[in-house]
Image (spheres, rainbow, N blue to C red):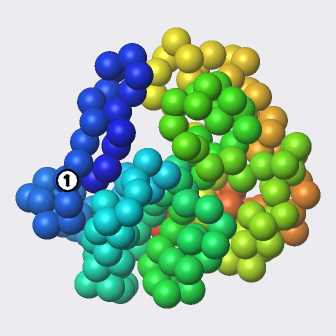
């Protein structure tokens, strides 16, 4: 719905509101499949009334479809306080942790205001507290779009190792939920034995 574009012109800027026919069609398709509606709004790139308007759109969709899960890619580029508010107000809000780690943030070289959930090799205290308190709302994810960069062994494996370290520092039930359980539940994927 809101994407600020890329510096290298590989991906254009996008701005579509919740009433746009493309958003309505995507939501209808997700609902028909029983999949979460993945919301791409870069709140970190929005200010003032634009931010308020897109937050209003998001909350409107969450309220209008209270039994359907919504998942914000890139954590919505939201900080822990905003994530907490959405979780408390909307039981159908979930967060995909793609591009929300130190490796991705550093590699982006300031291209976007990504959220870094980490402090060293562990989750930062505010994020750790939040995921322990609401383990059913977070899904491990990577956003590997560009093969020359995102799938390179150094970049990809560095993210995996960072997440392994962070997840090993959490209670087992929380780790299981974030690493795979929530994705299995939300996308109705049978767990592997």
Residue with the most extreme left position: 21
Report the residue marked by disc 1: 16
Pick the residue in front: 127 or 113: 113
Q: Position of residue 47 (x, y in %)?
A: 41, 57
Which residue occupies 61% across, 26% down?
Answer: 109
**Disc 1 secondary structure class:** loop
Q: Residues within 10 Å of mark 1 (few under 14, many from 20)?
A: some
Instruction: Note whether residue 9 is visible.
Output: yes
Q: Is residue 119 left or right of residue 89?
A: right
Q: Which image quadrant for residue 92?
A: bottom left
Q: Which image quadrant for residue 41?
A: bottom left
Q: Is residue 150 left or right of residue 179?
A: left
In this rendering, the count of numbered labels is: 1
Q: Position of residue 124 (x, y in %)?
A: 82, 57
Q: Is residue 117 left or right of residue 54?
A: right
Residue with the most extreme front position: 48
Instruction: Note whether residue 73 is visible.
Output: no
Q: Is residue 136 above or below residue 127?
A: below
Q: Position of residue 135 (x, y in %)?
A: 69, 73
Pick the residue in front: 37 or 103: 103
Which residue occupies 82% across, 44% down?
Answer: 164
Q: Is residue 31 above or below residue 10?
A: below
Pick the residue in front: 148 or 175: 148
Q: Position of residue 129 (x, y in %)?
A: 80, 72
**Quadrant containing the C terminus in the rendered view:** bottom right
Which residue occupies 58% across, 44% down?
Answer: 114
């Amino acid at each position: 719905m809101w994407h600020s574009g890329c510096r290298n012109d590989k991906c254009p800027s996008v701005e579509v509101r919740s009433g746009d026919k493309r958003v309505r069609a995507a939501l209808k398709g997700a609902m028909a499949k029983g999949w979460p509606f993945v919301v791409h709004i870069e709140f970190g790139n929005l200010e003032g009334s634009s931010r308020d308007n897109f937050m209003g759109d998001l909350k409107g969709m969450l309220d209008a479809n209270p039994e359907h899960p919504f998942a914000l890619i890139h954590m919505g580029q939201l900080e822990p306080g905003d994530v907490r508010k959405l979780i408390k107000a909307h039981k159908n809000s979930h967060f995909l942790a793609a591009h929300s780690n130190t490796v991705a943030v550093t590699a982006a070289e300031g291209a976007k205001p990504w959220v870094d959930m980490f402090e060293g090799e562990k989750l930062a205290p505010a994020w750790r507290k939040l995921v322990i308190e609401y383990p059913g709302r977070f899904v491990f994810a990577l956003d590997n779009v560009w093969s020359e960069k995102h799938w390179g062994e150094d970049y990809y494996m560095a993210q995996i190792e960072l997440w392994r370290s962070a997840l090993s520092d959490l209670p087992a039930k929380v780790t299981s939920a974030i690493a795979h359980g929530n994705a299995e539940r939300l996308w109705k994927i049978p767990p592997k034995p």
